[in-house]
C-alpha cells in the first residue's frame, strides 16, 4: 500500500496554516511541533505511520466549522480523529493534511429519559454513555470492545458494533440524530428525538461513512432499559462445525441471544493461558451464549439453549448466572486479541462477515489456507451476526513471513465475499481493505459511491485516499500490513 | 399516463430507465398503488409498472434473511414467514390488501412495534436497484454487520422511489413471539396516559406496543413472548395500573392490527388524517397546539412518539407543519384520494438538510427521472 505523496505546495503553506488555525481554536488547541505530532502519526493500524502538518483540537462545533473553512481556503486535507483506536487505518493522517481531533468535545449535553435518548458531543467515550444513563436504569447497546477508549464520533464514522449486534443492532440502529459540519463549513442538524424524519435517510448515509462526508459534532443516541435478567452459558464442542450447528439450532428455535460467540482451540488455549478464566482446555471449540430479557423468559430460554447445545453434541456445559460469573466468561472472549501476544510476536486481525451457516466450510478453508501458507490462524467469531475475526499469527522478523501473512489475509477476505459475505463487519475499510473493494463492489457500484463522495465533498478534502481504491481490479488488492502490535495492547478488542 | 412500460426483470427495468433518460421523460413507479395517499402526487410524464418484478428469491429461515423482488405482495411474505415462526418485526402497515414489499419500503412504513424493534430501514440489509443512469447497483448485502462503503441500502428506504428503482431487497427477519397479551386501562386523560407510558417504557417487561385511543381514554400496553412470560408480565402491568383488562391473544392481535392500519382513524368527509412523529416528551405540547387548530381527535402510538391526528380539512397544512416542526417533529399529511395532489404532504426540511437531500437526489438521479414531485417540489 502506497501512502499518498504529500503535495509540495501544501507543505509550503504549513506556516500560514498554523498561523491561521491558532486563532481559530482555544489556547493550546493546535499542535504543530514535530515532536508533539508523533502521538498522532497512526491509529490502531500501526503499520502505517505518517505525521500530519498539525493537529487541531476544537472545543465547539463553530470552531470545527472555522477550521474546516480555513482548510478549504488553503486546500489542506482533513482527517477527523476520535480516539485513534480504529483498526483499518481510517484515521491515518496525511503528510500534507491536518488531523482534526474531537477529543476536547467530550461533554454529555442532555439525558432525555422520556424520549429514551441522550445527546453527546463526539469525543465522549462509548462506555461513558452507558455509565451516564445507568442510574436511570438505561444503557447504550453498541459495545465495541475498545469501548473504554473509543469515541461516539468514531463509532458513528465506522458504524461500530460489538457482541450484541444481532439482537440490538449496530450504531446505525441506535442513532436518532447528528449535527454535522459539512466540507464547506456549514453546520447541519439531521434527525432529532423523533423516530422518523422527513426526506431522505441521511443518518444512514453518514453512519459508517468513515469521515468522508462530514464531521460529526453532536449525536443523539437511543438508550434502552436494562433487561431485568441475563444468563449465560458456555458449551464445549469437539469440532467447530458442532458449535456452528448449535448456533443454527438456537436461532431455528426462535431464540435470539443477546450475545453468541465461538472460539476455536487456538484462541481458547491462548486466552486460558493469558487470563485463567476457567475455559476448558483440550476442546476444539467453545460456544458462549448469553440471553437477556424478562426473568421468566430468560430462564426458559437458557434451559432451551442448554438442551439444544447438548443435543448438538456438547459434552460440557457450564452456566454463568451471576453478574460476576458472566463477566469472567466474557472477559476471556474480550481478551482474545491481547492474548495472541502470548502465541506470536505479530498478528493480523481480519474482519469479514459471512452468512452464519457457511461457518464450518469457511473455517475448513481457512484451515487449509493456513496450512498452505505455513501460518497459524486463530479464530474468534461473532456467531450471532456472522462477523469473523481470524487472527493470522506471524513473525515480522522471519524473512518473507509478513508477505505471506498479507497474502493469507487477503485470501481469507476474498473467501468471505465469495460465500456471500462482506469485507468488513465493523472495523471499516480505511486504507487497510481499500484495494480489496473491487472484490466485492462492481465498477458501477464503486463509480456511484465515488460520485456521492464528490457531490458531498467537491474539494475532496475530507479524509481523502480512504475507502475507495485507486486501482480497480481485485487482483491488485494486496494488503501490505506490517506488525500486528496494537498501540493500546491493554484494550479489549474485537 | 401516456406511456406505461412493464419490464419483466432487472435488465428490462434498466433499459426502461436508459430509454427515459435519453428521451428526457420521467417515470412514475407503480405496483399495486396502495401507497398513493402517502406523499405528494408525481408529475411524471410516463410510468413504469413493476408488477412483474414479484416473487421470493431466497428464504433462509436459519440465516434470518429473505430476498424478494419489490412487487411481491406483503401478505405473501408474511404468510410464508409465519409458517416458519418468523415475521417482519417492524410490523409494516399494509394500507391496502394488495400492498407490496417495494411500496412498504418506498414509504418506509413501520408499525406499532417500531419504538422498540426498529423501523423498516433497520431491517433492510441490502438492495439491488437501478439508478438514474440506468446502472444496476448492488449495495449492502445479506449480513447484519457491514461497513463496506456508503450505506445506500437504508437511504433508499422512505425515499418514495425518488432515488432509484429497487429490483431486489434482502430483509432481516425475526422470530415470531409465541404469544401476546394486551393490558387495556380505560378512563385516562392524555396527560395521565403519557405519564404512564413514560414510566412503563422504562420497565424491564418486554413491552412491544404502547398506545392510546382518545374516544374511551384507553391506554393499551402489549407484551410479547412465551405464554408463561407474556401472561406474568401482563399481570404485573395490570396490577400496577390497578384497573383495566387483560386482552387474550386473539383480542390483542385484533387491536394492534387495527391500530397499525389506523382503521379507527379513517378521516370522515371534511377531515384530514396526519401521521406525526415527535419526540415523546413533546407529544402533549404538540397535541395541545393542534387542539388550538381545531383537532378532531388524536390517537397515540410508539409510547407517545407517533400521533395519528384528524384535523378539519379547512385547517391549513402549513400551520400543522409549523406546530410540529417547531417541536422537532415531522408530520405527513395523508391525501384524501386521487383528486388530492397533497402538495403539503411533508413538514418542510430545514435549509441545510434540504440542500443535502438535493445533493443526494442529483447524484443518484441526475435528471430527476424517478417519481418527480413525490417527495418534494420539483426544483
Image (cartoon, grey):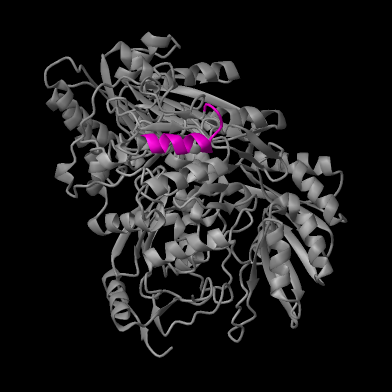
Q: Residue at x 47, y 18 (%)?
A: A331
From the viewer's perspective, tell me whether residue B370 is left or right of residue A217.
Answer: left
Residue at the farthest bottom position: B2
Q: Main secondary structure of the magenta part?
A: helix
Residue B162: x and y in percent read: 45, 69
The mark total stands at: 0
Dividing the picture into quadrants, the one containing residue B24 is bottom left
What percent of the width, then of the height, locates residue B187? 88, 56
Residue A94 at x, y = what percent? 32, 36
Magenta highlight on residue A20? yes
The magenta stretch is A15-28
The front one of A162 and B164 is B164
The answer to which of A310 and A347 lies nearer the viewer is: A347
The quarter holding residue B45 reads: bottom left
Left or right of residue A252, residue A324 in this image? right
Residue at 28% over, 57% down: A447
The quadrant of the image that shows the N terminus of chain B is bottom left
* Left or right: residue B349 compared with residue A485: right
Residue B101: x %, y % from top left: 46, 65
Q: Nearer the viewer, residue A476 or A251?
A: A476
Q: Is residue A266 something one can see in this rendering? A: yes
Q: Residue at x 36, y 71 (%)?
A: B53
Magenta stretch containing residue B11, yes or no?
no
On the question of residue A218 being in view, the answer is no
- Asked if residue B8 lies left or right of residue A139, the reply is left
Amino acid at each position: 500500500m502506497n501512502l499518498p505523496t504529500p503535495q509540495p505546495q501544501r507543505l509550503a503553506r504549513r506556516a500560514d496554516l498554523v498561523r491561521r488555525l491558532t486563532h481559530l481554536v482555544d489556547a493550546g488547541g493546535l499542535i504543530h511541533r514535530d515532536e508533539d505530532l508523533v502521538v498522532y502519526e497512526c491509529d490502531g493500524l500501526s503499520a502505517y505511520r505518517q505525521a500530519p502538518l498539525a493537529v487541531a483540537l476544537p472545543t465547539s462545533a463553530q470552531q470545527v466549522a472555522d477550521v474546516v473553512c480555513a482548510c478549504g481556503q488553503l486546500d489542506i486535507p482533513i482527517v477527523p480523529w476520535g480516539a485513534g483506536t480504529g483498526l483499518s487505518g481510517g484515521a491515518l493522517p496525511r503528510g500534507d493534511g491536518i488531523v482534526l481531533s474531537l477529543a476536547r468535545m467530550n461533554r454529555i449535553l442532555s439525558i432525555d429519559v422520556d424520549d429514551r435518548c441522550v445527546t453527546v458531543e463526539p469525543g465522549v467515550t462509548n462506555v461513558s454513555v452507558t455509565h451516564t444513563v445507568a442510574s436511570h436504569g438505561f444503557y447504550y447497546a453498541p459495545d465495541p470492545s475498545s469501548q473504554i477508549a473509543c469515541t461516539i464520533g468514531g463509532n458513528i464514522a465506522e458504524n461500530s458494533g460489538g457482541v450484541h449486534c444481532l439482537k440490538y443492532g449496530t450504531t446505525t440502529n441506535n442513532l436518532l440524530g447528528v449535527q454535522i459540519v459539512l466540507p464547506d463549513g456549514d453546520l447541519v442538524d439531521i434527525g432529532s428525538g423523533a423516530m422518523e424524519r422527513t426526506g431522505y435517510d441521511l443518518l444512514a448515509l453518514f453512519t459508517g461513512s468513515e469521515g468522508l462526508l462530514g464531521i460529526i459534532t453532536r449525536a443523539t443516541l437511543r438508550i434502552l432499559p436494562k433487561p431485568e435478567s441475563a444468563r449465560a452459558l458456555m458449551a464445549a464442542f469437539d469440532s467447530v462445525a458442532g458449535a456452528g450447528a448449535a448456533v443454527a439450532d438456537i436461532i431455528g428455535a426462535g431464540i435470539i441471544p443477546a450475545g453468541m460467540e465461538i472460539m476455536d482451540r487456538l484462541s481458547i488455549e491462548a486466552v486460558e493461558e493469558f487470563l485463567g478464566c476457567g475455559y476448558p482446555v483440550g476442546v476444539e471449540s467453545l460456544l458462549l451464549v448469553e440471553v437477556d430479557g424478562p426473568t421468566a423468559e430468560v430462564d426458559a430460554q437458557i434451559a432451551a439453549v442448554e438442551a439444544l447445545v447438548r443435543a448438538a453434541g456438547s459434552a460440557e456445559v457450564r452456566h454463568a448466572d451471576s453478574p460476576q460469573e458472566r463477566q469472567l466468561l466474557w472477559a476471556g472472549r474480550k481478551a482474545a486479541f491481547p492474548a495472541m501476544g502470548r502465541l506470536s510476536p505479530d498478528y493480523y486481525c481480519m474482519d469479514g462477515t459471512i452468512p452464519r451457516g457457511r461457518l464450518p466450510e469457511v473455517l475448513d478453508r481457512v484451515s487449509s489456507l493456513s496450512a498452505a501458507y505455513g501460518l497459524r490462524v486463530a479464530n474468534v467469531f461473532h456467531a450471532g451476526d456472522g462477523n469473523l475475526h481470524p487472527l493470522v499469527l506471524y513473525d515480522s522478523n522471519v524473512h518473507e513471513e509478513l508477505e505471506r501473512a498479507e497474502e493469507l489475509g487477503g485470501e481469507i477476505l476474498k473467501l468471505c465475499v465469495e460465500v456471500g459475505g462482506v469485507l468488513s463487519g465493523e472495523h471499516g475499510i480505511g486504507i487497510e481493505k481499500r484495494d480489496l473493494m473491487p472484490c466485492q463492489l462492481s465498477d458501477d457500484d464503486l463509480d456511484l459511491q465515488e460520485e456521492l463522495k464528490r457531490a458531498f465533498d467537491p474539494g475532496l478534502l475530507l479524509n481523502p485516499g480512504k475507502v475507495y481504491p485507486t486501482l480497480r481490479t481485485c487482483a491488485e488488492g494486496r494488503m501490505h500490513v506490517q506488525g500486528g502490535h496494537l498501540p493500546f495492547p491493554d484494550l479489549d478488542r474485537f | 399516463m401516456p406511456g406505461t412500460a412493464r419490464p419483466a426483470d432487472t435488465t428490462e427495468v434498466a433499459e426502461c430507465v436508459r430509454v427515459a433518460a435519453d428521451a428526457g421523460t420521467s417515470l412514475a413507479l407503480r405496483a399495486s398503488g396502495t401507497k398513493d395517499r402517502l406523499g405528494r402526487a408525481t408529475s411524471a410524464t410516463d410510468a413504469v409498472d413493476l408488477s412483474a418484478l414479484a416473487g421470493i428469491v431466497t428464504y433462509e429461515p436459519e440465516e434470518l434473511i429473505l430476498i424478494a423482488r419489490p412487487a411481491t405482495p406483503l401478505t405473501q411474505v408474511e404468510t410464508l414467514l409465519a409458517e416458519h415462526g418468523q415475521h417482519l418485526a417492524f410490523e409494516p402497515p399494509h394500507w391496502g390488501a394488495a400492498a407490496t414489499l417495494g411500496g412498504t419500503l418506498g414509504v418506509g412504513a413501520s408499525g406499532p412495534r417500531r419504538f422498540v424493534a426498529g423501523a423498516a430501514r433497520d431491517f433492510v440489509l441490502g438492495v439491488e436497484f437501478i439508478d438514474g443512469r440506468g446502472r444496476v447497483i448492488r449495495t449492502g448485502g445479506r449480513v447484519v454487520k457491514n461497513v463496506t462503503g456508503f450505506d445506500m441500502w437504508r437511504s433508499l428506504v422512505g425515499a418514495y422511489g425518488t432515488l432509484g428503482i429497487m429490483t431486489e431487497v434482502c430483509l432481516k427477519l425475526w422470530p415470531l413471539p409465541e404469544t401476546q397479551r394486551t393490558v387495556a386501562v380505560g378512563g385516562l386523560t392524555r396527560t395521565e396516559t403519557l405519564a404512564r407510558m413514560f414510566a412503563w417504557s422504562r420497565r424491564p417487561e418486554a413491552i412491544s406496543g404502547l398506545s392510546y385511543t382518545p374516544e374511551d381514554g384507553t391506554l393499551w400496553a402489549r407484551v410479547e413472548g412465551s405464554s408463561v412470560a407474556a401472561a406474568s408480565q401482563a399481570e404485573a402491568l395490570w396490577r400496577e395500573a390497578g384497573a383495566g383488562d387483560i386482552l387474550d391473544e386473539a383480542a390483542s392481535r385484533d387491536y394492534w392490527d387495527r391500530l397499525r392500519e389506523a382503521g379507527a382513524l379513517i378521516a370522515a368527509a371534511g377531515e384530514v388524517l396526519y401521521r406525526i412523529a415527535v419526540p415523546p416528551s413533546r407529544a402533549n405540547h404538540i397535541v395541545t397546539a393542534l387542539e388550538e387548530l381545531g383537532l378532531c381527535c388524536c390517537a397515540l402510538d410508539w409510547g407517545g412518539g407517533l400521533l395519528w391526528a384528524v384535523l378539519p380539512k379547512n385547517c391549513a397544512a402549513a400551520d400543522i407543519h409549523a406546530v410540529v416542526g417547531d417541536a422537532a417533529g415531522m408530520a405527513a399529511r395523508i391525501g384524501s384520494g386521487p383528486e388530492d395532489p397533497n402538495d403539503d404532504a411533508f413538514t418542510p426540511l430545514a435549509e441545510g438538510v434540504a440542500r443535502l437531500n438535493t445533493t443526494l437526489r442529483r447524484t443518484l438521479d441526475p435528471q430527476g427521472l424517478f417519481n418527480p414531485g413525490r417527495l418534494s417540489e420539483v426544483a
